Image (cartoon, grey):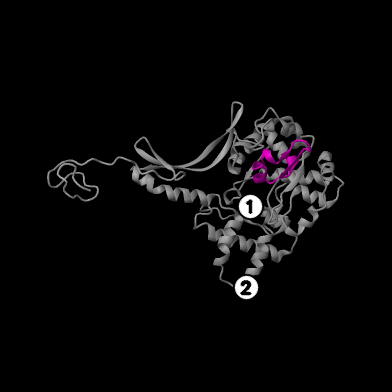
Amino acid sequence: MTCIKCGTQLPEGAKYCYSCGRKQPVDRRSVRRPNGSGSVYKRGKTWTASVVIGWRSQQRGSTMVRVPIRSSKGGFSTRAAAMAYLPQLRMEEKNKDITFKQLYDLWLPTYRKSKSTLNCYKAAFKYFASVHYLKLKEIDIEDLQDCLDECPQGKRTKQNMKAFCGLLYKYGIPRDYIPKGRNLAQFLIIDAEASKKKSGFDTRQLDLIRSSVNIVPYADYIYCMCYLGFRPSEFLSLRVEDFDRDKKFIVGGAKTEAGTNGTVTISPKIQPIVDRLVGSRTEGPMFPDPDGGYFSYNVFRSSCFYPALDSIGIENPVTDGVHKYTPHCCRHTFATLMKSVDAPGADKIALIGHTDDSMLRFYQDVNIDDLRKITDSL
């Protein structure tokens, strides 16, 4: 660059001419960052970094609009520090959405023990099929325990499942894929009898829940969970798009490697609730949070499920930090209700969901009318 007064050659970005002293014009054009790279803003005396990590649908008047879901971190002393943190914040959020299978795919190449042992762990991984596509942050100990309990193999295979799960969490925690102190594998119980301490709601409790619908907030959600049989994380992720209004069934649940979802017909006992919640919407969560978005499992459990049971009048004592009744009890309730229904085992398996890819053969012959006979009888 040259001085605007005397024409002396100046270093790029010079503010003054060292020859004549004339102040040079400053190029105030800001460097535009790429879309989606995040933003920073000042809050009080500190700066905050913010990135958009997703979008959700929200009803505004008569239309549905897309609203950004943001993740923020504050406390930076300077704007530059907040800007520099944006890539890390985005990476942290990306890691938070990693699924069980994605973590497995990352871990697998790092295993260096014998081939025979690795084959055992590969086999164990298949029995966790119901959580393969769940986000790690949404997986609860009950999800993993259900996989262990529903495994049709013997004790040795279940020991491999627990060992494999321990290795997976040991790999994921220090890499920030899993929150520190959340090694769920250590709480898995192999003994079948010991692992079945939790039970579903009995008939009296189910009647209490039913009579509290439209009175106690989220009693309707709990009642629906008891008659749909989905795992809690699956239930909360159900979409309006997966609801067939004419035939009255839902396609949802954990995906398998074959890419299929389960078909669950809707019991007449909860059909009015489902129709009311869905309304005229064509997309978004079937069971939305107060803002119209998807509930996270932890928020639903602590802010909705437990307070609702308390208001309904169902005692829920806590032993060693664990509640007697958790959202998973609704799935146990559904399984218990099906015991009294005379129907083929394959149809019951299709409704409750499967954890073994070998069970896929049963799905090929399942008929919706056969499934409806079961849910209509619950």
| Mark number displayed over residue 254 | none
Q: Quadrant of residue 57?
A: top right
In x, y percent, where is residue 343? 86, 47
Residue type at tag 2: Lys
**N-terminal label among 2 and 1:** 2
Is residue 75 in sight in this rendering? yes
Position of residue 258 in the picture relative to residue 367 (left or right): left
In x, y percent, where is residue 220? 70, 33
Q: Which residues are magenta?
A: 226-251
Label 1: which secondary element: loop
In x, y percent, where is residue 370? 84, 45
Is residue 313 in sight in this rendering? no
Image quadrant where one finds the C terminus? top right
Residue type at tag 1: Tyr
* 191 in relation to 219, above or below: below
Q: Quadrant of residue 248?
A: top right
**Quick one: 238 or 295, which is closer to the camera?**
238
The residue that mark 1 highlights is: 133
**Quick one: 99 or 169, which is closer to the camera?**
99
- Residue 137 lies within the magenta run: no
**Quick one: 113 or 13, which is closer to the camera?**
13
Label 2: which secondary element: helix
Task: Estimate the spatial distance between the alpha carbons at disc 2 and disc 1, rounded to whole Å.
Answer: 26 Å
Asked if the residue at tag 1 contacts the one at tag 2, i.e. Cβ–Cβ closer than 8 Å, the answer is no
**Quick one: 258 or 136, which is closer to the camera?**
258
Figure disc tally = 2
| Mark number displayed over residue 115 | 2
* 244 in relation to 179, above or below: above
* 104 in relation to 236, above or below: below
Between tags 2 and 1, which lies in front?
Answer: 1
Position of residue 159 in the picture relative to residue 53 (left or right): right
